[in-house]
Image (cartoon, helix red, strand yellow):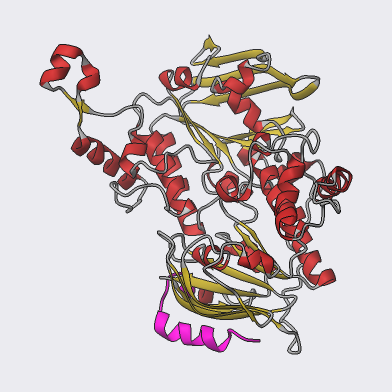
Amino acid sequence: MSHEVVLQMEGVGKKYGENAVLKNVSLQVKAGEIHALLGENGAGKSTLMNILFGMSVIHNTGGYEGAVKISGEEVNFSSPNDAITAGIGMVHQEFMLIPAFTVAENIKLGREDSTPTILSKVFGHRLERLDEKKMAADARKSLDSIGMSIEEHVKVAGLPIGYMQFVEIAREIDKLGIKLLVFDEPTAVLTESEATQLLSVMKSIAEKGIAIVFITHRLSEVMDIADSMTVLRDGELIVSKSVSDTSMAEIAELMVGRTIENIGAHAKAQEAAEHAAVAVKVEDFYVDMPGEKVNGVSFEVKQGEIFGIGGMAGQGKVGIPNGMSGLMPSDGIVEIFGEKLNLSKLGAAMEQGVAFVSEDRKGVGLLLEEDIAYNIMFRNMAIRKKFLSPFGLLSKGKTHKHANEMIKVLDIRCRSWRQKAGTLSGGNQQKVCLASALTMEPRVLIVSEPTRGIDIGAKELILNYMTKLRDEEGLTIIMVSSELAELRSLCDRIAIVSEGKIVNILPPDAPDVEFGLAMSAVGVGESSKSSNSEGSV
């Protein structure tokens, strides 16, 4: 590792009005170093990176205090383009891709290759022809470097979330002259094997002398690959130290200011009672979702059960909830407490008491320009009409009271219910999505990647709250997650999906080898018979 300091942030402070979101924060990253930037959602990590990248939200609100230096030279970027020119790249937690463009076009966006034409020689380079062959070759090289086999000519629209993350990473790797790469929750949407692959890629990038700022909530990843770390809490610097001098337990305590219990420790992982009603019955179910097709799955979920669905990215696990909710074309039979669901009607699931928290919180879950209160209420107003006056108008008193209750229950870090959802951190946006779903007072709650991008304290809160809903209110929950450990900590049974089929349905305490074989789709035909026999309890 080089001793050259690539990034130095000294005494950085930032206020939004009277609210100080950063207070005298300092950060230093050396060439070839992987530096973990840690803290709960709302701790100030995103604001610190917005300052580094010259984002307009910083300049339009009075700028910042302190100094930012790149390779010893003080900078004050006026736009992200300035940061990119200085050799800084970022893999965003919320994707910055253009859905209508191909993978190659997204990777080469802003750095397109072109060849001269007769007209361009006379009227200028704007009339040059795109060298699509060269662009595709560059994209292929970047994708291969991170072990991604997706074809470079397919459009981004409809790709699974995990694939989009790899496209983001490939785009940054394609850039020349990179000194510093910021990875913002890069593994949040990946399965464990994909995350392992990505961490290996990050190590190889650092070995080339590129400095890395690594924002993650998976503390095991910090221990695996980070050289040093900085912990923020409530906008203040808590500690900067070598990772070799700490532990996961200490990091968690530093982040939240209290001792963290084992996530999911309160989950009972119990079998559904034999006398419980069948809440959800899925039979011969197909979903036509690009990259996540479902090929005839069948299973049953009992009332009061937390039923997990796991598997590798692109194997169909995400397609199941999207098909059940009517967001993707589907076929087959889905029954909710014995009543058949109209799969062709968008909104039919909500009308039958099914609430869905999508893995795509910005594209599906939120109205980004509306305030928190409206985001929490709008589904209920459309279906349940609980918060409307007798004249059909919004009852502001009831709405604001309920919004404040949900903000408190789920610990949504915000200025007030008036704050726009689009200005919240990713984890707090996820909490608003969950609050909206719970406001529907559902009989069945479906959550897809519910803790993606959420810090350890918030993850504990959400997972334990879901357990409480099951144990105290008998709520039936279907949970889709890329984190097998998370499923095993919370769920009563776990279905593993591969090639669009359920390979096996396992109890959470099944041997690791059984989960490994199911995830690898070993013996799909034989194991799927097992899944059918275990589909009912």
Q: Nearer the viewer, residue 203 or 181?
A: 181
Residue 495: image x %, image y %? Answer: 56, 74
Residue 509 location, quadrant:
bottom right
Quarter of the image with the C terminus in it: bottom right
Image coordinates for residue 104, horizontal then vertical, percent:
31, 41
In this rendering, would 88 be left or right of 392? left
Question: Residue at the location (51% across, 18% down)?
Answer: 79
Whether 522 is among the magenta residues is yes
> Which secondary structure type mostly characterizes the magenta part of the structure?
helix
Q: Residue at x 14, y 18 (%)?
A: 119
Task: Determine the residue located farthest toward the front in the rendered image.
Answer: 391
Relative to residue 436, is residue 17 depicted above or below?
A: above
Image coordinates of residue 310 in percent, x first then y, are 54, 67
Q: Which residues are magenta?
A: 516-537
Relative to 427, 73 lies left or right: left
- Asked whether residue 460 is in view, the answer is no
In the rendered image, residue 112, in percent from the top left (x then y), is placed at 29, 29
Residue 394 lies in the magenta stretch: no
| Count of numbered circles in the view | 0
The structure residue drawn at horizontal position 36% and vertical position 38%, both measured from the top left corner, is: 106
Q: Is 159 in front, or is 525?
A: 159
Spot the residue most to the left: 118
Frontmost residue, 91 versus 233 = 91
Image: 482 above or below 303: above
**Is residue 184 shown to the viewer in this render?**
yes
